[in-house]
Amino acid sequence: MSLPVRKGLDFTPSQWIAAFAGFFLSGGLANVLVLRGYLPKHWAIILVIIGFGAPPAILGWLKARTRTES
């Protein structure tokens, strides 16, 4: 008995684009906030991780929502 192996993430191309855009935008925002002194360095990585993960999750949720409503 074996379990199926899933290879890679189930991201669509639009989710990858949103992930990279969110990554770079949140990285730039975190850099500005750290340089201005509004955000400690240790918390900046959390902002970048959220920026990378939230946009694809939102797109996936919207896509699943529109699929079930149709």
Image: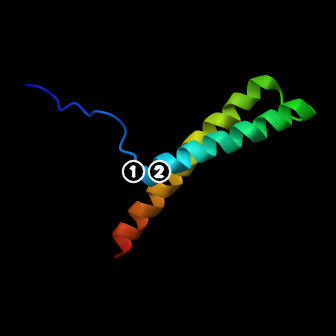
- When the figure is inspected, residue 45 is found, relative to residue 14, above or below; the finding is above
- When the figure is inspected, residue 62 is found, relative to residue 54, above or below; the finding is below
Q: Is residue 32 left or right of residue 4?
A: right
How crowded pointer 1 is (Cα within 10 Å; few <14, some 14-19, many 20+) is rated as few
Q: CA distance from mark 1 to mark 2?
A: 5 Å
The quarter of the image holding the N terminus is top left
Quadrant of res 53: top right
Q: What residue is shown with label 1?
A: 12
Picture residue at 66% right of the left edge, 35% below the top: 48
**Residue situated in front as seen by the camera: 35 or 41:** 35
Q: Helix, strand or loop at disc 2?
A: helix
Where residue 41 sits: x, y (%)? Answer: 79, 24
Q: Is residue 6 left or right of residue 44?
A: left
The quarter of the image holding the C terminus is bottom left
Which residue of the protein is positioned furthest toward the right in this rendering?
A: 36
Residue type at mark 1 is Thr
- When the figure is inspected, residue 70 is found, relative to residue 53, above or below; the finding is below
Picture residue at 47% right of the left edge, 46% below the top: 16
Q: What residue is shown with label 2?
A: 15
Picture residue at 84% right of the left edge, 37% below the top: 32
